[in-house]
Amino acid sequence: MKKICENAMKAEFPSLSQNEALARALASSFLMQLNPTVSELADIKCAVSEAVTNCTVHAYRDTVGTVIMTMKSYSDRSVRIEIKDRGCGIEDISTAMQPLFTTDRQGERSGLGFTVMESFCDKIRVTSKPKKGTKVTLIKNLSKLYAST
Amino acid sequence: MDFENGNVKLTVTGDTLCAYISGEIDHHSAKTIREAIDSALTSYSPDALILDVSEISFMDSSGLGLVLGRYTKASEAGISFSVTGVSERTKRLFDMAGLDRIIDYDNKEKKR
Ligand SMILES: Nc1ncnc2c1ncn2[C@@H]1O[C@H](COP(=O)(O)OP(=O)(O)OP(=O)(O)O)[C@@H](O)[C@H]1O
Ligand SMILES: [Mg+2]
């Protein structure tokens, strides 16, 4: 059966740290329509928070730029979330995704953002170009709904 | 939907500094929490630091950074360090980060 996109939304906001909470709230509002489990919702909120925080902290390190967040839900109960920035980009993606790797030691970063995204989502894709920006795509398959009796 | 910011309440009992952290702990809220705990560490120089995380509603890797940072600071100053009130959700994040190998934490949610 071909999967069909059932709903979509797009948001743009400046990379201010208070928008980390805004992005989580947007994600959970969008998801609520799909009746996710408490744990699925918490997983997605955490992964979104990681991706958006990376825009604030790394992509637009000493500036403020635009973060673009798009969400799509599909008929097979998969959800696709894209977080995009036009910031500094990542030189070496596979190194950046290694657990504990961070370029920000003074900032008390643990280098676990990508590890969290990977383990709380079913799939993650990262594309990036130095000086152009980064796009993180998170995919989560929600469990099937059971008809209540 | 909550937009609540992380918050911290500090109490000193004897030689123990306890930091009750509540709300959403992310990069945005971690800064204030960190500053509050660190300045209390300086002014009281306690023998023990306890982070009570039983009232947090959200935490991501910035929270891990906050906990690990306080652990490092306490260890360097010879202060004993522990975390209490770790929920199942928080434990999952802590275990993922390997915190169980270096930090003492219980995973019992506080009874209310
Ligand atoms: N959007 C981005 N733009 C530029 N660089 C990024 C971006 N996202 C991640 N990075 C780079 O990848 C590294 C690893 O990111 P990750 O989120 O795993 O860890 P961290 O942000 O350094 O620490 P933590 O997330 O644990 O606080 C970062 O230190 C940074 O160098
Ligand atoms: Mg990060």
Image (cartoon, rainbow, N blue to C red):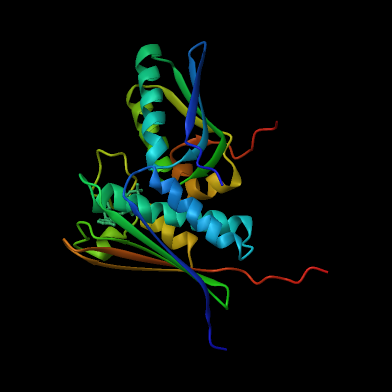
Q: Which quadrant holds the C terminus of chain B? A: top right
Name the residue: 19% across, 57% down. A88
Counting from the top left corner in percent of width and height, residue A2 is at 53, 87
Q: Residue A17, located in which quarter of the rendered image?
A: top left
Q: Is residue B87 above or below residue A140?
A: above
Q: Residue A127, located in which quarter of the rendered image?
A: bottom left
Name the residue: 42% across, 52% down. A49
Residue occupying the far bottom of the picture: A1
Side of A101 where B100 appears, left or right: right
Counting from the top left corner in percent of width and height, residue B24 is at 49, 40
Counting from the top left corner in percent of width and height, residue A69 is at 39, 61
Counting from the top left corner in percent of width and height, residue B61 is at 41, 47
Q: Is residue A79 above or below residue B2?
A: below
Instruction: Specify whether residue B11 is in view.
Output: yes
Instruction: Specify whether residue A100 is in view.
Output: no
Q: Is residue B89 above or below residue A84?
A: above
Front-most of residues B48 and B3: B3
